[in-house]
Image: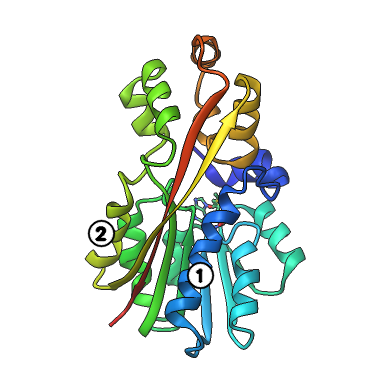
Amino acid sequence: MDIGKLYDQSIAGTYDRDELGLYSGARDKAYQQIKTHIGNQRIDDVLDLAVGTGESLLKMKELFPEGNLHGIDLSGEMLKIAKTKLSFNAIHDDVLNTCKHFPLASVDLMLMYFLTTFVDGSEVVRDTSKLLRPGGYYSIVGTTYEAFPRIDELARMTLSEDFLKQANPLPMGTETIVSYLSDAGLDVVAIDTFTKTVEFSDFKDFYQFGMDSGFFTHILVQCDRAQLETFGRLENIFPLKDQYTGSIVLARKP
Ligand SMILES: C[S@@+](CC[C@H](N)C(=O)[O-])C[C@H]1O[C@@H](n2cnc3c(N)ncnc32)[C@H](O)[C@@H]1O
């Protein structure tokens, strides 16, 4: 699936609504980790992998006003929105090509927020951690299979294991994200989770959230009508309550 196109055409226009506050809540916890552990250490260069609409770089500008800001993303429309908010070195490319754009040891703080759904996190962290200067930090916010346990259970009742693995290849849990960082030779300095109860009144409400927010768009667009109808017809599941959990990990290069 062309994820850049999906964000350009279906998600960019609604992404910043963040109606349930899941993106902002999890990012806020990551900013807190950064404030606590990096504090006022000197940060010259911040690189946001999958910068999206620029929300995290905006915050980094506040925390590190002297720092140079860089962001890479596959979606031109997401980058266009980011550029209305702040001035930064915007690169329209796949994160798999990040190392072509930056010399080794040229970044002090790397962000990777809500990207682990779309890439092999272990490969991206291994490659991009080479861009960190010694003493540099890597901050990850990720959604894992622990994120929506009730929705996951219902999805498994209606969709095959193979379909779900292909359509939504997530890290297993927070420990998997921790392993991306430690396997790349970084020292993990903080592990947190952000949790929030969510509720959907009916299937339409759930579908709208899933499509507009980007949380389930990549799965929903791969479902055929019959699969969606089966999910919508499950009896007594609405109002559907679940508890969202996002994983938030900070690591340091020795
Ligand atoms: C859920 S959004 C997260 C955006 C931002 N990090 C945030 O915290 O709001 C996912 C972003 O990843 C981008 N993306 C997905 N796969 C990518 C890839 N392989 N390379 C670069 N960007 C990618 C999408 O275009 C989208 O902007």
Q: Residue 131, position in %: x, y?
A: 39, 77
Q: Residue 90, position in %: x, y?
A: 62, 68
Q: Earlier in the sequence, mark 1 or mark 2?
A: 1
Which residue lies under the disc numbered 1?
A: 32
- Residue in the picture at 51% in, 12% down: 236
The amino acid type of the residue labelled 1 equals: Gln
Q: Can you tell me whether the CB of the residue at mark 1 lies under 8 Å from the nearest atom of ligand 1?
A: no
* Residue sitting nearer the eye, 156 or 130: 156
User: Is residue 63 visible from the viewing direction of this image?
Assistant: yes
Which residue lies under the disc numbered 2?
A: 179
- The nearer-to-camera label among 1 and 2 is 1
User: Is residue 74 visible from the viewing direction of this image?
Assistant: no
The quadrant in which residue 162 appears is top left
Q: Is residue 214 above or below residue 88?
A: above
- Residue in the picture at 51% in, 17% down: 237
Q: Is residue 238 above or below residue 181?
A: above
